[in-house]
Image (tube, coloured by chain):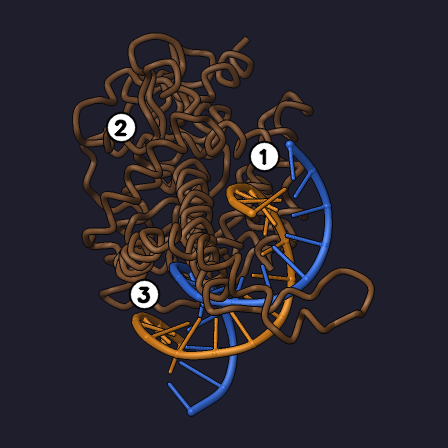
Chain colours: A brown, B blue, C orange
Amino acid sequence: MLSRLFSEVLPDVQRLAADWADTPDEVAKVKSEHEGHLGGEDDLDEARGGDSSSRAESEMADEEEDEEEEEEEEGGVDEGPEEKGNKKRGPKKRKTSAARQERSKVRRVKANARERTRMHDLNSALDNLRKVVPCYSKTQKLSKIETLRLAKNYILALGEILRNGKRPDVVSYVQMLCKGLSQPTTNLVAGCLQLNTRNFLTEPDAGRFHMPGSPFSLHPYSSSSSSSYRCRLASPNYQGPGGGPLNLRGHSYPSGFEAAYAPGGASPDYLSPDYEGQRSPPGCLGVGVGASGKQQELDAERNYHYSSMHYSRAGRGLTFGPSGARGGGAHSENIPPFHEGHHEGAVGPYEDISAFFHN
DNA sequence: TAGGCCATCTGGTCCT
DNA sequence: AGGACCAGATGGCCTA
């Protein structure tokens, strides 16, 4: 199933994935990480895999010791007495001796280990992908299939923005992102983007949306403080459209959104990285999910991660994921979270887009 | 408890 | 022959 999905979205994410997963550095890192995990990690999957993996590897080691014996054994055992009298033509059917069976078993064990490693590499690549799509949480990861779908949509959305050369409507943007996603994932993404899913899924005139029963009356270009649905992503340096430099703090919105949706001219508290106030209107998140206490916790966590930098400037030029790591820049795994003081003046991968929007 | 997601094992196929 | 890749089967975990 995963492979089918890969082939479905691969044309869109191939370059991205290739950059992340196929670099020798990356693979080596993943492997060493994996080997490190075998001793036991907090990751449930790794722990499970690690147990069986180490078991398999110890078996492998044991069996490889016997391999020479088997080689010697094989010659004599393969030609049994019954085969001598066999005048049949065609390829000799080799008898499955104990040694052969043993060797086959060893091969199988090795193949299993390789397969595990391969799948771990694949999962690492997927993790890297999770970190750069618009909704990232360590605690509640997007499923594999949803990650790929969201990545595809994200690429398409960015491409659309570049193609049109204009700021898309925030609702359209979210719609693009959520196309084909499951309802829970749609909720999750909407939560990350501080939107009420109802508004972009059901409102016919979604470009101007309003939240009934909520203090939030949102308009993409409104200058009211209700625009806090996009809090924390804009820089304190932000000076409004056409104003000063725009330094993005979030990576998930194209910069045009920052310019378009942040209250013009001001640098309100909620745009500050330190803002810890309400980031979403009551009832804004978790539509259809139920905003239980736990859910709210998760949502808060999502929002935090969403607004965190998933990329790093790393001092020189733009580094983005492992391709940045290749040049000695920050690896996506090593990118510091928002609050750790590495974000000052950070410029995201949309720096170019930002320039584009402001030229 | 059903369904979704996942890791792992396994055999098949293709390629080097 | 061996490795990479793939897809089916299986069983565990989690959540609604």
**From where the camera sits, is residue A61 visible?**
yes
Mark 2, other Cα within 10 Å: few <14 / some 14–19 / many ≥20: some
Instruction: Give me the residue at 49% from left, 31% from top.
Output: A22
A68 and B15: which is toward the camera: A68
- Subunit ID for the residue under disc 3: A
Instruction: Give me the residue at 45% from left, 57% from top.
Output: A187
What is the distance, in whole Å, between disc 1 and disc 2 at their CAs?
A: 31 Å
Instruction: Give me the residue at 49% from left, 48% from top.
Output: A147
A173 and A145: which is toward the camera: A145
**From where the camera sits, is residue A140 visible?**
no
Q: Is residue A183 left or right of residue A140?
A: right
Q: Which mark is residue A80?
A: none
Q: Which residue is mark 2?
A: A268
Q: Which residue is mark 3?
A: A291
Closest to the camera, between mark 1 and mark 2, is 1
Where is residue A21 shown, x and y percent of the image?
47, 34
**Helix, strand or loop for disc 1:** helix
Q: Is residue A233 left or right of residue A197?
A: left
Q: Is residue A269 left or right of residue A119?
A: left
Q: Which callout, 2 or 3, points at the residue further toward the start of the chain?
A: 2
> What type is the residue that disc 3 sits on?
Ala
Mark 3, other Cα within 10 Å: few <14 / some 14–19 / many ≥20: some
Q: Residue furthest right?
A: A89
> What type is the residue that disc 1 sits on?
Ile
Where is residue A300 shown, x and y percent of the image?
26, 51
Q: Which mark is residue A155?
A: 1
Q: Quadrant of the C terminus of chain A?
A: top right
